[in-house]
Amino acid sequence: MIYNEQDHMIPSFFIIGERKCGTSSLYRYLCEHPQVLPGKLKEPDFFSKPMEVNKNSFQQYLKNFPRKDSQQETLAWPELDEQGILFEEKISFQKQSKNLITGEASANTLVEGDPKLVNRFLPNCKILILIREPVQRTYSHYRMFERFKAEGRSMPFKLLPFEEMIHWEIDQINSGHKSPFIYPSLYIKTITRWIRAFGSKNVMIHFSMELNSIDKCQETLQSLFEFLGIDPYKISNFKKYNKAPEIAKVPCLEFLQSYFKTYNQRLFEYLGSENLWE
């Protein structure tokens, strides 16, 4: 199902996750490229609600992206202050190139989205996945919800103390269910679904550590630009976006490392590479 008669650009790339892995920084780096124009929202969060996805709602979704004849867009950017409190700022992008592409970064889609449904509506879209050492990612995700709770936001589940939370989650996973923080770090359970739906040539997986240094980040971005079919480009604004306060120490560290070990081994065997987290 391809919609060619739209007034708006159709996303050429989709950063589907994972959360707390550097997806915000990656999106901003991509948006700096002269041939990439962002949408109005970084995270439209459309495909994580499959019951609402249909032809008419897809037309509304596309309105998040620039018109085909446009060379400028204003992005509503979510950012964290020094205390880790989320705020929003408006950022205008203007490009001179006529060969523009656009994309989005709803980072919960890796777990919550249906790959077949996304492929049905965006069959030509390139899928980008960013993953992080799972213990650090899990705890960082939990701390984000601690901040949300402190801000007075409504919670979709009861937030237990971390040690209680992880044991409850493991029980959920053993019962065949997803869970808020641990399940998204079991990358082998989710990545394979997306590769089956889009094919390995249309899915690119990188590690958050690749964005930690300027040289490695530039190298990673060049491979992404080539993957997206756009010109080589060297970014000038190397900054960590949406970065939470540093983690001092992860509770239950050895327990979680042991829990994730088998899943990590399966992941790296699937990817055909050495285990970077041992």
Image: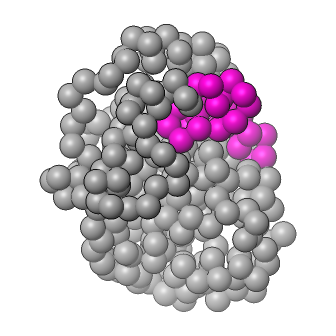
Q: Residue furthest right?
A: 1
Quadrant of the snapshot with the C terminus: top left
Q: Residue furthest left?
A: 82
Quadrant of the snapshot with the N terminus: bottom right
Q: Is residue 111 left or right of residue 95?
A: right
Q: Is residue 176 left or right of residue 218?
A: right
* Vertical position of residue 178 compared to residue 271: above or below: below
* Vertical position of residue 20 compared to residue 25: above or below: above
Q: Quadrant of residue 268?
A: top right
Residue at x 44% of width, y 61% of height: 154
Where is residue 8? Give x, y as percent: 61, 83
Residue at x 35% of width, y 55% of height: 148
Where is residue 197? Give x, y as percent: 78, 46
Which of the two residues, 209 or 153, is positioned nearer the viewer here?
A: 153
Based on the picture, tell me whether residue 181 belongs to the magenta stretch.
yes
Where is residue 23? Give x, y as percent: 43, 50
Based on the picture, tell me whether residue 22 belongs to the magenta stretch.
no
Residue at x 74% of width, y 70% of height: 53
Q: Is residue 96 visible?
A: no
The magenta segment: 170-198
